[in-house]
């Protein structure tokens, strides 16, 4: 199974990739940078303390921190930064974030190895394909076991992205894949209790991917079948694998990177349909929030557990809470990075409204997963009237994508708020949209942020 998967992945050649896929990959890179720069600002003190303690030096740049360190530590720091503000991309069926891991590993390697922009983007295409296919093969069982597929599958995807960017042969790629599989880790308990460690699942995946890739380059011998063996990836990660995602490749099917979503709200993706429904209904009740009797959110099963809490213990806890996200959207009229602030997560009016929200499974909506991850918001007023709105595809889903202009606006708003100059924001966009661009020029532009 591993050999078949690798042969299929390796059949995706640069010369056969369409203009639309290259363009989408540039969009994914810009989206990644838009969330990593503010994430670095949020985690700067902690990440700097970590690097100081290790005495880290090297030639790989940590985005947004103006510092160089080893390849693996740069990947770790970038990966953690990319997941802090909960605005990174993802995939609906695979239930994982993708670019946060893959670009976090690829960029330090591209800088170190002096790769071309085409090599970087090709590596990303292969990395996304690998991670998403593996995630689709093990979900929802992987999540139900408590694993974070961003960590488990992201490790392998990022390693394969590096392998493709460095043009590994088959045996090197198999070695790297196997090393990544045995390194794959990440559990969802890290998102509980307002913990800071959920981003570690992303950072560690990127860090371990770098190690796995260079082990592969050195030709460490791989087992016969790390994916399908009797104690391989599929056996360990789920009870019910969907092996067709590993073995069946349709050359006419769209590549996985074209099927990702890009976020507009700074909270767990499970909350986005309900947030959007709240924003839609808000104009009708903007002056009547105190007259709300109760709120019910009908969702699919996977969106209930871990996302129905009203005991908000901090910003991280708020971003995982459907009740808080709905209350915030109704109260503030937005749910961006700045809205999930310490001030708002302790605002008694927002918290009181959140306590009126009940999240319940709707079996019809559960039956639609993964084709749709929908929510129905029902707001009951004290006078007996009810307002209801359903959202199947919130903004950013492949069926309802961000336009190029909206993505640029997302980058500019987040990067400017995090200290990147307007001049450098323009330079980043100009570089990424060029037919080819210098990796070092891009990284140099990203490092000139205010402290």
Image (cartoon, helix red, strand yellow):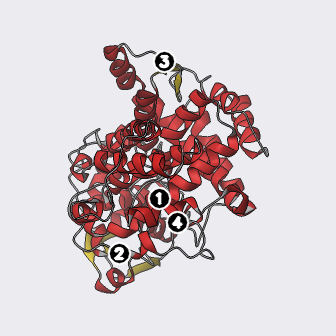
Q: Contact (CB < 8 A) between labels 3 and 2?
A: no
Of the numbered discs 3 and 2, the one sitting upstream in the chain is 3
Which is nearer the eye, 365 or 348?
Answer: 365
Q: Quadrant of residue 32?
A: top right
Q: Can residue 87 be seen in this view?
A: no
Q: Where is residue 184 in the image (x, y as percent from the top left)?
A: 31, 48
Which type of secondary structure does the marked residue at label 1 adopt? Answer: helix
Taking the spot 75% from the left edge, 46% from the top edge, the residue there is 433
Taking the spot 56% from the left edge, 59% from the top edge, the residue there is 10
CA gap between label 1 and label 4 equals: 10 Å
Which type of secondary structure does the marked residue at label 3 adopt? Answer: loop
Q: Mark 1 points at which residue?
A: 130
Asked if residue 343 is positioned above or below residue 405 in the image, the reply reads: above
Of the numbered discs 1 and 2, the one sitting upstream in the chain is 1
Q: Where is residue 419 in the image (x, y as percent from the top left)?
A: 58, 28
Badge 1 density bin: few <14, some 14–19, many ≥20, Cα 10 Å: many
CA gap between label 3 and label 4 equals: 36 Å
Q: Where is residue 117 in the image (x, y as percent from the top left)?
A: 69, 41
Which type of secondary structure does the marked residue at label 2 adopt? Answer: loop
Taking the spot 54% from the left edge, 57% from the top edge, the residue there is 262
Of the numbered discs 3 and 4, the one sitting upstream in the chain is 4
Asked if residue 421 is positioned above or below residue 334 in the image, the reply reads: above
Q: Name the residue under label 3.
A: 58
Q: Contact (CB < 8 A) between labels 1 and 2?
A: no
Q: Where is residue 57 in the image (x, y as percent from the top left)?
A: 45, 15
Q: Name the residue under label 4.
A: 8
């Amino acid at each position: 199974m591993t050999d078949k998967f690798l042969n299929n992945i390796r059949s995706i050649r640069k010369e056969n990739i369409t203009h639309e896929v290259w363009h989408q990959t540039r969009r994914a890179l810009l989206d990644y940078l838009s969330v990593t720069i503010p994430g670095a600002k949020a985690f700067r003190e902690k990440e700097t303390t970590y690097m100081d303690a290790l005495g880290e030096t090297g030639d790989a740049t940590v985005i947004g921190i103006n510092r160089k360190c080893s390849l693996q530590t740069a990947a770790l720091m970038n990966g953690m930064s990319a997941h802090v503000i909960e605005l990174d991309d993802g995939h609906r069926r695979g239930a994982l974030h993708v670019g946060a891991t893959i670009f976090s590993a690829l960029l330090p390697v591209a800088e170190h190895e002096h790769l071309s922009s085409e090599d970087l983007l090709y590596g990303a295409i292969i990395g996304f394909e690998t991670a998403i296919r593996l995630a689709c093969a093990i979900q929802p069982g992987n999540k139900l076991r408590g694993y974070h597929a961003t960590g488990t599958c992201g490790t392998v995807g990022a390693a394969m992205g590096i392998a493709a960017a460095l043009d590994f042969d088959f045996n090197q790629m198999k070695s790297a894949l196997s090393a990544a599989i045995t390194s794959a880790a990440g559990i969802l308990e890290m998102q509980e209790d307002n913990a800071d460690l959920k981003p570690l699942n992303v950072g560690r995946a990127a860090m371990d991917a770098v190690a796995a890739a260079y082990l592969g380059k050195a030709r460490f011998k791989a087992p016969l079948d790390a994916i399908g063996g009797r104690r391989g990836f599929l056996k360990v990660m789920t009870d019910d694998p969907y092996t067709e995602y590993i073995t069946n490749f349709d050359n006419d099917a769209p590549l996985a990177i074209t099927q990702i979503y890009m976020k507009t709200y700074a909270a767990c993706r499970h909350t986005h349909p309900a947030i959007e429904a709240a924003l839609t209904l808000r104009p009708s009740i903007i002056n009547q929030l105190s007259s709300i009797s109760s709120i019910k959110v009908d969702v699919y099963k996977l969106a209930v557990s871990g996302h129905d809490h009203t005991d908000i213990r901090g910003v991280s806890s708020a971003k995982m809470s459907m009740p808080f996200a709905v209350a915030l959207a109704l109260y503030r009229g937005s749910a961006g990075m700045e809205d999930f602030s310490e001030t708002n997560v302790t605002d008694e009016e927002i918290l009181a409204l959140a306590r009126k929200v009940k999240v319940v499974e709707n079996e019809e909506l559960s039956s639609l997963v993964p084709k749709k991850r929908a929510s129905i918001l029902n707001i009951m007023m004290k006078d007996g009237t009810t307002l209801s709105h359903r959202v199947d595809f919130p903004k950013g889903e492949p069926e309802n994508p961000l336009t190029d202009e909206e993505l640029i606006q997302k980058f500019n708003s987040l990067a400017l708020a995090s200290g990147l100059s307007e001049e450098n924001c323009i330079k980043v966009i100009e570089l990424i949209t060029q037919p080819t661009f210098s990796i070092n020029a891009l990284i140099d532009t990203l490092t000139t942020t205010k402290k």
